[in-house]
Amino acid sequence: MANPIEVTVPDIGDFKDVEVIELLVKAGDAVEKEQSLVTLESDKATMEIPSPDTGVVKELKLKLGDKVSQGALILLLEAGAGGGAAQAPSQAEAAPRPSAPAPAAASAEAKGVAPPPARSDVSDEVPPLPPVHGRPVPHMPRDELVSKPHASPSVRRFARELGVDLTRVQGRGPKGRITHADVQGFVKSALAGTAPATRGGGGALPFDLPAWPDVDFAKFGPIETKKRSRIQKLSGANLHRNWISIPHVTQFDEADISELEAFRKSNTAETEKRGFKLTMLAFLIKACVTALKQYPQFNAALEKSGENLIIRGYYHIGVAVDTPDGLVVPVIRDADRKGVFDLAKELGDISKLARDKKLKPGDMQGGTFSISSLGGIGGSAFTPIINAPEVAILGVSRSTMRPVWSGTEFAPRLMLPLSLSYDHRVIDGAAAARFTSYLASVLSDIRRSLL
Ligand code: CAO
């Protein structure tokens, strides 16, 4: 075996006393020719020093934080079998190599050339950098790079290989630099469902969201860490996707349900005898079906491609149910073919199934429109999140008795607040206002549901 090669810092132009910020190999590692060995960083540029040959690292001669200039010894490399003829690059030839990924070259962010995209959907291939011919490349002041994640080319490459969007990764290296370990940690938490979501809506966002704040909460007071349930993680991810990919608008309205409430109360004794509860929600489902028939685009779905709207000839109503493990949305099928008593009984049954964790996946599929009722709890209005691919959802808050002007006098009326969120790509504001007005009129006189 030939004597170990001394691998030194090649010509890095005018850069002097440049800090070693990453050791990418250790003693005993087998390395390929051109594989990055260490990362150096000046105020202006990040550089990776490639291996001049294939071989095994015998001894590392640098440590993190060292300041180096051209000629500084990096490591001793035992050239691999057949690679004994390899020589340490001369100072003049080490850096430039037209096809080399980043030989002694400042990373693209410091080159004044278009940087390789930091997106997660770029190809795995590392974009070739132009030859630098041993000259330091023009650099960009650090403050022009504020929006770019702070990471070395090898970390960027690693992130690209794993499909990780670096803007979502919290850097824990020196000066907030993102390290290999940070990328690995991000992937682990993404698999566990705890990482900030990646781009939603098929890459619909023209920007990347900043990384989630990483706070040491215990620094500020006592804390308790609680695992989120599987349902919370799953529904949370879906809610996040729907929130950021659907342009939501919420139309608020109110319905005079004074007569309806009297009618409901006159029937509760009977339904109690039959073993179920008759709440306002059953009437709301019925009234919504009537309004959906009148305004079919609210019962539609947006096709994944965005090309077509699917108008559905069935009325499967999703109902948000609050359970100790989180929110679930079971679906009441063919609500148009069921009477209010049937709906009330089914509502009771599915909310019990939901709370007993006995819903099957099929029970939560196929919905055409959803209702989220917080009426049993309180509040006067809220903005429900649409359940994609549906295009609208009705939020219902607690009814209150209020004086309402009849035209000649104030009269006490029971008013039900309605909050309709709709996908503005599919539904115009005027249509939404018509829908809620119509729904309110149906609730004011439920006999309209029979028409
Ligand atoms: N105004 C006034 N009172 C109302 C009301 C309203 N709009 N809606 C229901 N109530 C009353 C009911 O009549 C019932 O009164 P009694 O206890 O006197 O009989 C009480 O509130 C409790 O109703 P309920 O919640 O048991 O029944 P429901 O049919 O209204 O709702 C269900 C069923 C499953 C939807 C509900 O229990 C639930 O889980 N709601 C939460 C949904 C949710 O979390 N949505 C948020 C999604 S966005 O994060």
Image: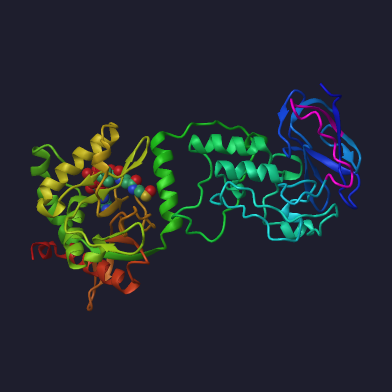
Report whether 128 appears left or right of 360. Answer: right
Tell me, yes or no, whether the highlighted magenta stretch contains residue 85. Answer: yes
Quadrant location of the N terminus in the rendered image: top right
Residue range of the region highlighted in magenta in the rendering: 74-94
Examine the rendered structure and indicate whether residue 359 appears above or below residue 150.
above
Residue at coordinates 53% horizontally, 51% vertically from top-left? 121
Q: Residue furthest bottom?
A: 408
Which residue: 58% across, 48% down?
Answer: 165
- Lateral position of residue 282 relative to residue 73, left or right: left
Prevailing secondary structure of the magenta residues: loop
**Nearer to the camera, 24 or 289:** 24
In the displayed structure, would residue 143 be above or below residue 76? below
Please say whether residue 220 is visible from this viewpoint. no
Find residue 441 and report its horizontal and vertical position in percent.
19, 68
The x, y position of residue 272, in whole percent, is: 12, 40
**Residue 238, relative to residue 444: is it above or below?**
above
Residue 151 is one of the magenta-drawn residues: no
